[in-house]
Amino acid sequence: MPYGIHELMVARVAAEVDGDGVVVMGSFTPLAYAAYMLAKLTHAPDAYLVGFDAVGMAPIPLSFTGAEAAAYKGAVARWGMLTEINSIHLSNHGGVEAVSSAQFDGRGAINLSAIGPFEAPKVRLPGGAGAAEVIKMYRKMVAYFPHHSPRTLVDRVDFVTGTRWKVGRAAREAAHLLPGPVVVVTNLAVLVKDDDDRPFRVESLHPGVAADEVVAATGFELEVGLHLPTTAEPTAEQLDLLRQRIDPLGTVKIDFVPARERLAYLKGILDAEWARAAGAAPAPARGRA
Amino acid sequence: MNKVVPLDALGELVADGDSVAVGGGWFSNHPMAAVRQLLRCGRRDLHAYTVVGSIDIDLLAGAGALGHLSFSMVTLEAFGLAPNVRRAIETGALPFTELTGLGLLVGLEAQGRGVPFLPYRGPFGSDIPQRYPDLYRTVSCPFTGEELTAMRAIQPDVAIVHALRADAEGNAQWDGTSGPDVEMAKAARRVIVTCEEVVSRAEIVASAHMTKVPGYYVTAVIEAPFGAHPTSHVPCYSSDPWQLLDYAAAAGSENFGAYVERLRTETEEAYQSRVLDDGRGDVLCSLAALSQPLATHESDLDLTEA
């Protein structure tokens, strides 16, 4: 079945999600959310999801207006931020976290703070929220980048908002961290690092991508094997779940459309969300539970 | 004790120069009616604290109400970088402290517990702590010698949070997302609770398991229906991405002064009738009411009937 690169990336990120530990959703990052839902509906029914303060939530369809309310309705508990960080991150219950950032480097460091000097930046970025602490704490760190380029995958980030800090098993265990790899999923390839003293290695190339293309698009050193496997393509079942149930509005693709088309694409999704609600049954009284 | 005051009284409860912790997170449950009121009463030089701010913080920055911003994230997510915060920091107009998200929460918890700092396994390897030695230091565990991050207690002058409902004593309840609201309330010198509805004590008693901030923390209660708009207050209403889109466009343009001026000069009632009438508010309520999780094998029986 024909598919988009965003769908391959969702499937590959989903493959990292398992039933071991908690998956926490922070910012509404559609690709990561879609991957968690896909995993939960396929190979990882025991994945424990927390999002919008909704603990143990059921999988939800992605939308800009309904995701939070859907998460609320399928949760077994509702916490606030402090209880979450105490009960998940700081107590080593974090399983898998998928993040993206403006810059990422070969140490596993992310920059969500500033391009250029920190105090007088060329571009002030949003900040890392909990990423500064938690990307080192999760058993697996997954970083995904819709546009694999040397501007994003850089030799050294301008500012370390957060970092994996310890990578190899022994170093992580000595630091009271769960051992697990850093997995990078881009629109070209999958890169993996599981040893502090060795660079990222190319784990697989996406269909039609050559190794030298990946090396040229990467600002840090890579280990490139002679015979690299091809990244698995999304299955018909996965594509059907993504298109029909998880993301019928197409929110994941928003990070893949060209910048000049992005606003129109976003408005198209919002029009569809409006139509869904405006055509619905009478609403409850305004502002009341 | 009756702590209920009108929204108009907010200006008497927050002074120029105060540090103000603003509740909510991302596009959920920011105390937006209070934010708009801070603009109306012309507050200046505020030191805002936010864990994950969005339109709340960007609007305060764009209106010139901030003298300092302490944050771990300010984002408009799909609608882009926060234009006013970005501009103010890039031009050097807004002094700021970029905190790590867990550090900020641990600092609030330390204050809430009445200790000067708390240790935790902090943001090792991050460039943030070394920039702020007044907030982040290292400390050795007295038992094992392990090196930990010491996060200094953070005490804002005021916390403003938006609840589902509260009684006149300030006993405040949340049903959906409460974000950082409880830890902010417990750390601040004064706490202002805005809420969708002021209810009787009997109603609070009947749903006591939902009370997250008890009244003895609370200075004032303000009834503000749709008080988180255009962010969400689940389960009552969803966020309003159409208004957020308008905001992002205005904040990124030369005409943002006019956007702020309109908010400053209209009452909250006039704002709400401008943005929520013609059924728009009902659509936001419908979106919250209609949205359901996906049915799965383990939830088929109970969720499809909900």
Image (cartoon, rainbow, N blue to C red):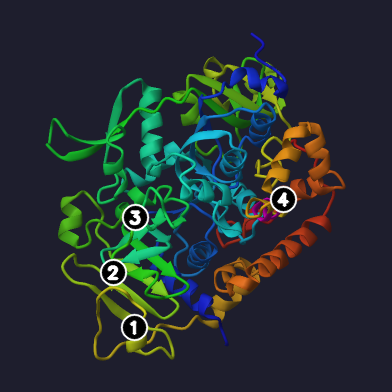
Quadrant housing residue A178: bottom left
Q: Which residue is mark 1?
A: A216
Residue B245 placement (x, y as % from top left): 68, 55
Label 3 or label 2, whichever lies nearer to me, is 2
Estimate how packed mark 2 is, as few (under 14), some (14 to 19) or many (20 or more) residues with alpha carbons within 10 Å: some
Label 2 or label 4, whichever lies nearer to me, is 2
**Measured Cα–Cα span from mark 2 to mark 4:** 40 Å
Q: Which residue is mark 3?
A: A135
**Measured Cα–Cα span from mark 3 to mark 4:** 33 Å
Identified at 47% across, 51% down, the residue is: B90
Q: Which residue is mark 4?
A: B243
Residue B305 appears in the rendering: no
Q: Are marks 3 and 1 on the same chain?
A: yes
Range of magenta residues: B243-249
The amino acid type of the residue labelled 2 equals Asp
Q: Are marks 4 and 1 on the same chain?
A: no
Estimate how packed mark 3 is, as few (under 14), some (14 to 19) or many (20 or more) residues with alpha carbons within 10 Å: many
Quadrant housing residue A200: bottom left
